Image: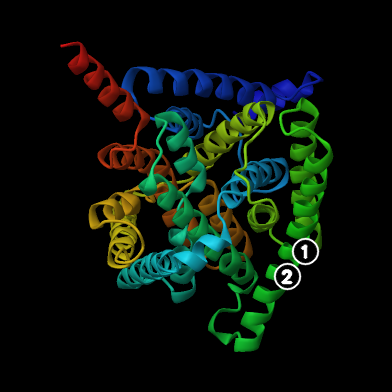
Amino acid sequence: MQDLLTFWNADGASASLPTLAWSLVLACAAAAGYLVQRHSGLPKVAGYSVVGAIAGFFGFADAAWPLTGNALFLLQIAIAVVLFEAGARISLRWFQHNPMVLVQSLLESVLSFVAVYWLLRQFDIAPIAAQALAIVAVVASPAVLTRVVMDTHAAGPVTERAIALSTLSTLYALTIGSALAGLIEAGENTGVLATIAPLFKLLGLSLAVAALLGLAMRAALRVMSPTSENTSMLLLALIAASTALATLVGGSAALSALLAGLLLKQVNPRPWIWPRQLGTAASMLTMLMFVLVSTVAAGTVWSAAGAALVLGVVAVRLLAKVLGTVLASPGSGLRLSQALWAGCAMSPMSSVALLLASQFALASKTHGATITGVALPCILMMEVVGAVIATVALRRAGESGRDHAREAGDSGRGALE
């Protein structure tokens, strides 16, 4: 690949070879996603991830690790779009009427952190590296889950609860993980005040950017039609601008987008509907995000010796999320069986987990290799397998659109008979 790059650049071409490579990879991913969904019923993200993984294994698409430059900025924009939409689905008034949802969210997140941290320490992983990896494991992927919901046409209490819980777990992990990334080299020598101060600084700066983004979008929606093509371009431009601004001032772009969605939902309680044009652009960014995640994860050096640890992390994480969701289900509005499927639906890991792992790997020269060796295989595995588990969970919960269509067809045949 390096020889090809040298030859291409020496020829003075206007477009670089990586541009050609990524164009071909994305074209293959789009076709694979369509074929996977059409012929297997699995979500398109499975096809996207497989193509990205193949490109990463063979070094076809150049993606450096830890993420920097254009790759990092594109990933941040894609994450911001997804998290803004996810945040705009959650009303804080809901928690006043049903506080057990917050208890459910906190319990599954804490159990995920504790279980993964304990397992990593059993394998003699350094406490700081184990802490970073445990924070990464807390994240459930709203991006994968919303893609699965879209492809399966799922709707119902399990679907909504899984999206809400995955969004909240992302909020916790981004807030704590982004703040602690800069302290990972200091280790246990960091005092309590030095640990808490960066967290509040990051949260404050991210909240300020979120407020600017939310107010700008609120003002735009007052004078522009939500279905206008210009409105969709304006919203995407504002999200891109907030991503750059949050990074510039020292906040978290992903956290800012998530908080902006939450704030906009509070001042505009009506259901948020993406403009059709914005949905198309967001889908392109989402596909790019999934392909980039799997390409980066597959392009790293894998070790057969660490396979047992990776499988163990994946297993205890899934068990902790299911257990936390089920234990806090009484009074939350979900039956035990529904809580079980909601916990399974939160198994995917993807872009936010990769972003946090990149931050930790970049911040720590001492523990970066350890974090990379465990986090990236887990992310790649659970981007594909997690999407399949979430699909099965929503179907077993009876909330897949295909199940509803099948029931309607059976009812129609029964009426004719």
How many numbered badges does the structure rendering display? 2
**Above/below status of 265 relative to 47:** below
Disc 2 packing (10 Å; few <14; some 14–19; many ≥20)? some
Q: Is residue 407 left or right of residue 267?
A: left
Callout 2 amino acid: Gly
Q: Are marks 1 and 2 in contact (CB under 8 Å)?
A: yes
Callout 1 amino acid: Ala
**Above/below status of 195 relative to 144:** below
Read off the residue under disc 2. 204
Disc 1 packing (10 Å; few <14; some 14–19; many ≥20)? some
Quarter of the image where the C terminus is located: top left
The one nearer the camera, 100 or 198, is: 100
The one nearer the camera, 220 or 133, is: 220
Per the rendering, the mark at residue 280 is none
The one nearer the camera, 263 or 353, is: 263
Give x and y (percent) for residue 414: 18, 17
Read off the residue under disc 1. 208
Give x and y (percent) for residue 103: 41, 70
Give x and y (percent) for residue 393: 30, 42
The part of the image, by quadrant, that contains residue 203 is bottom right
Which residue is rendered at x = 46% and y = 32% of the image?
45
Which residue is rendered at x = 58% and y = 35% of the image?
286
Is residue 369 visible in the rendered image? The answer is: no
The part of the image, by quadrant, that contains residue 329 is bottom left
Give x and y (percent) for residue 163: 46, 49
Q: Is residue 72 left or right of residue 46?
A: right
Looking at the rendered structure, the secondary structure element under dot 2 is: helix
